[in-house]
Every structure is written in C-alpha cells, then in structure tokens.
Image (cartoon, grey):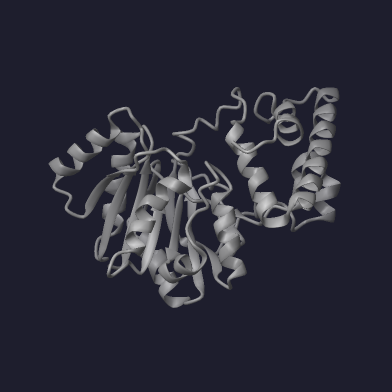
C-alpha cells in the first residue's frame, strides 16, 4: 500500500464524511486505505460514520473507535500505530483534518515530492481558507526570541530578529524546507516514523506537530512545505479556538509548557515564560493607552501567568 490516510473525527461526523469524500477523490490511482478514527465522540458519530461508509460501499474506508479521547496526537496514533504493525505497512502515512478538503491532485503532489526527495520525512500542503485566503501553516521552532516577539509585538524587535518569529513571513510562495508544519494536511514517510516515533500523547492538543517535526529534524529528516499540494481548511471546528470571546483552554498552556520543558529544559522554559509574560503586559498596557483592540483571547495574560507560574502542575 502506498498511502494510509487518517481522518480524526470528534463530534463532526457530517463534515468528516465530506473530508473523506475529498480524500477518496484525491487518492484515485494510488494504492490506499482511509482510516476514520472517531475519538470517543459519544454523540453517535461512530455509528453515523459506520453506517454512511457501509451505505456508500466505500471498501477502502474503515471506521475505528479510539475508545478514549486522548487528544489529537493520541487519536491519530490509533491508526498510525496499527498501520506500522501491519505485515506490509504503507510507504506514506497521511493525516487530514476532518475540516480539510484536498484538491484532486493534492495527495499525489505530496507522494511525488517525497518520492523525489528521499530525506524528506515530513511534507505538508499549502493550506487556504474556503475563499482561497492562505493560512499560516509554515513555521519555525519556538524559542525565547520568538516568545519575546510574540509577547512585546514591537516593530523594532522584528527588525532586530527578522528570522525568529514562529510563523514564516512572508508566506512561502514556492516549495521550501521549514522547521514544522500544521497538522491539517501532513504526510510522513514510514521510515521516519519508525525511527523517531509517533505523536507524543502527553500533548492533548497543540504543539504535538512541533515536537514530532523537531524529533525528525534531530534525526536528520527534512520537513517540507509543498506549494503544489493545495488543501482547503475551515479550521478550529472541533475546538472553537477561533472564538476570541472564549478563554484559551488550559490544555494549550499545558502543551506549550510540555514542549519547552521536554525540548529545552526547565531553566529555558522559565526564561521563555518570563520574557513572554513581560512582553504581554507591555503590549496590553500600550494597547490600552492607544485605545487599540486586544486581539488575544479573553483573560489571556491572566491565564498565562496563572498556568505558568501559579497552577503549573501537569494535568
């Protein structure tokens, strides 16, 4: 089998089926299977998905129940782990968000690119919104410098540290190597996953792709942003993260802290937290003085301090 496609569902059965339809169309001509993992939705999603796949006669699609909602990485790992244990595992393992819809040639473009670049362990798509607007999905690894930039938000700092922001600016206009990619449409080479392992399930949501791409980089694998692979993405359908009137969820802070501590140690994490908190306080004071709107989720500074300096025990 050339490609295993994994689509993770959490309480979005109808949209997940639309994503599967798009994936099936993009996999024509490739030896493949699609594993739909219901991440313990407990809303009838598993039954709805199973019935729809059976009624449609999709012999290339399996619906799997995770049995436990351990988050994005854990849910995808259910299918990835099983595939790697098969007698003849797939050459490539491709994860697709349930609210992402590949163009007809998007998956083939990733396969062709990775076939031509044997050290490419991970490749991701150009992600755009329903109206074609590009999404920021090509990134650099987080650092103390990037925490200063995202906290203070000063033009002077950006000029001094032009290549330390986490999002790659300007957006890539051609295929290029990057540090890490968003997981909405991401393909892995089997050998890379066999060497570095699957998603770290300590992350419930967010930073799991960052961590996996960093492990791959440290093992000598390359990560590529492939412009020729185009995927439409709505974004945050399952999580509601686009709603700035809602606080940032606790798991985001936990995932961020775990990423920094795991990859850089507690002293570096403390420095990153102090720099970012100071920057946030400075930015919000300037915004109030200038009567500018606050772009962050409600209570973000308060919650950042709380979950990094007061109640920072892992959950």
Q: Is residue 187 above or below residue 155?
A: below
Q: Quadrant of residue 110?
A: bottom left
| Image position, residue 58 (x, y; %) | 18, 50
Q: Quadrant of residue 172?
A: bottom right
Q: Is residue 219 above or below residue 54?
A: below
| Image position, residue 210 (x, y; %) | 59, 54
Q: As drawn, is 21 to the left or to the right of 223? A: left
Q: Is residue 50 above or below residue 229?
A: above
Residue 175 makes an appearance in the image: no
| Image position, residue 118 (x, y; %) | 47, 77
Q: Nearer the viewer, residue 48 or 134?
A: 48
Q: Which residue is found at the position 30% from the left and 51% from the top?
A: 35
Q: As drawn, is 192 to the left or to the right of 272? A: left
Q: Which residue is found at the position 82% from the left and 31% from the top?
A: 281
Q: Nearer the viewer, residue 291 or 190?
A: 190
Q: As drawn, is 109 to the left or to the right of 45? A: right
Q: As drawn, is 142 to the left or to the right of 189? A: right
Q: Which residue is found at the position 85% from the left and 29% from the top?
A: 286
- Numbered-mark total: 0
Residue 5 makes an appearance in the image: yes
Q: Which quadrant is home to the N terminus?
A: bottom left
Q: Which residue is found at the position 13% from the left and 47% from the top?
A: 57
Q: Nearer the viewer, residue 33 or 274?
A: 274
Q: Is residue 216 above or below residue 264?
A: below
Q: Nearer the viewer, residue 296 or 83?
A: 83
Q: Which quadrant is home to the C terminus?
A: top right
| Image position, residue 101 (x, y; %) | 37, 47
């Amino acid at each position: 089998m050339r490609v295993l496609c994994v689509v993770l569902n959490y309480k979005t059965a109808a949209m997940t089926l639309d994503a599967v339809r798009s994936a099936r169309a993009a996999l024509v001509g490739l030896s493949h299977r699609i594993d739909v993992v219901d991440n313990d939705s407990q809303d009838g999603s598993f039954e709805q998905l199973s019935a729809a796949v059976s009624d449609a006669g999709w012999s290339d699609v399996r619906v799997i129940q995770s049995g436990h909602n351990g988050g994005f990485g854990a849910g995808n790992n259910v299918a990835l782990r099983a595939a790697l244990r098969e007698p003849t595992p797939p050459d490539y393992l491709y994860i697709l968000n349930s609210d992402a819809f590949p163009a007809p040639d998007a998956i083939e473009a990733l396969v062709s690119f990775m076939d031509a670049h044997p050290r490419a362990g991970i490749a991701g798509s150009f992600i755009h919104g329903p109206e074609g607007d590009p999404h920021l999905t090509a990134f650099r690894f987080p650092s103390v410098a990037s925490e200063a930039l995202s906290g203070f938000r000063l033009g002077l700092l950006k000029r001094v540290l032009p290549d330390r922001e986490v999002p790659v600016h300007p957006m890539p206009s051609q295929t290029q190597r990057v540090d890490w990619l968003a997981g909405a449409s991401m393909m892995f080479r089997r050998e890379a996953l066999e060497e570095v392992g699957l998603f770290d399930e300590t992350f419930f949501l967010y930073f799991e792709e960052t961590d996996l791409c960093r492990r791959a980089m440290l093992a000598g694998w390359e990560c590529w942003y492939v412009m020729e692979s185009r995927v439409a993405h709505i974004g945050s359908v399952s999580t509601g993260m686009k709603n700035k009137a809602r606080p940032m969820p606790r798991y985001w802070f936990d995932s961020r802290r775990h990423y920094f501590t795991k990859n850089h140690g507690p002293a570096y994490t403390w420095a990153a937290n102090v720099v970012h908190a100071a920057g946030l306080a400075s930015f919000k004071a300037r915004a109030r003085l200038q009567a500018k709107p606050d772009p962050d989720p409600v209570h973000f500074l308060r919650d950042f301090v709380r979950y990094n300096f007061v109640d920072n025990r892992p959950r």
